[in-house]
Image (cartoon, rainbow, N blue to C red):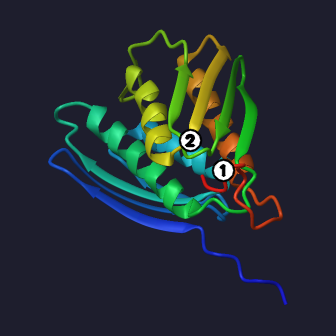
Amino acid sequence: MEEERRSRRARLERRTRETSVVVVLDLDGTGRSEVATGLGFLDHMLATLARHARFDLELACEGDLEVDDHHTVEDCALLLGAALDAGLGERRGIRRFGAAFAPLDEALARVVVDLSGRPFAHVSLGLVRERIGDVASENFVHFFRSLAVTGRMALHVDVERGENDHHRIEAAFKALALALREAVASDGSAEVPSTKGVL
């Protein structure tokens, strides 16, 4: 009889004077998402991430958008990373490493991830527009860095080419999704994939 696998689902909340965020994340989902952040382009990117990572994601945020989009983007990333970390538990039996290229028309992005337990982010997006939709371009760098911190991962995001900034960012999110899908996948063991014995 096959041993029952631990649920890799997490529900977290984060409430501050700036935002109120609730995330429900299932790492063994089908790519279904319900996202409402008040920022249409961020919603689009988070739905894209869930779809291609095959995560089920529910994320709702009420943020101080009358100030700007920074706190909403940051806190959504922080809580999403924390939910990923919680869903992984001890990180037993995962592949740990993931790498992916993703194109979107003329744009090409590469993402490499190590679910090492040690936060680090290198992010090079090469954006030229000040905003993409309703999100300041600089906040996408902050999104990936914040995700890496609470997700306790080493994350390298490089957009290698692209003439359209929408395409550049969307390619980056798709590559992140594919890399995470690989990294969280089962390696067929119950071992922690580290010589230290812990991640």
Q: From this viewpoint, which residue is outermost toward the bottom?
A: 1
Horizontal relation, residue 98 to residue 1: left or right: left
Q: Give whichever of 137, 150 is nearer the camera.
A: 150
Q: Position of residue 183 (x, y in %)?
A: 71, 48
The amino acid at mark 2 is Met
Any mark on residue 196, and which?
A: 1
Q: Secondary structure at mark 1?
A: loop
The residue carrying mark 2 is 153
The amino acid at mark 1 is Lys
Kindly report the distance in space between the C-alpha atoms of the residues bearing marks 2 and 1: 16 Å
Q: Position of residue 31 (x, y in %)?
A: 64, 57
Horizontal relation, residue 64 to residue 50: left or right: left
Q: Position of residue 127 (x, y in %)?
A: 50, 13
Q: Residue at x 14, y 48 (%)?
A: 17
Q: Residue at x 31, y 41 (%)?
A: 72
Q: Position of residue 92 (x, y in %)?
A: 68, 62
Q: Residue at x 60, y 26 (%)?
A: 157
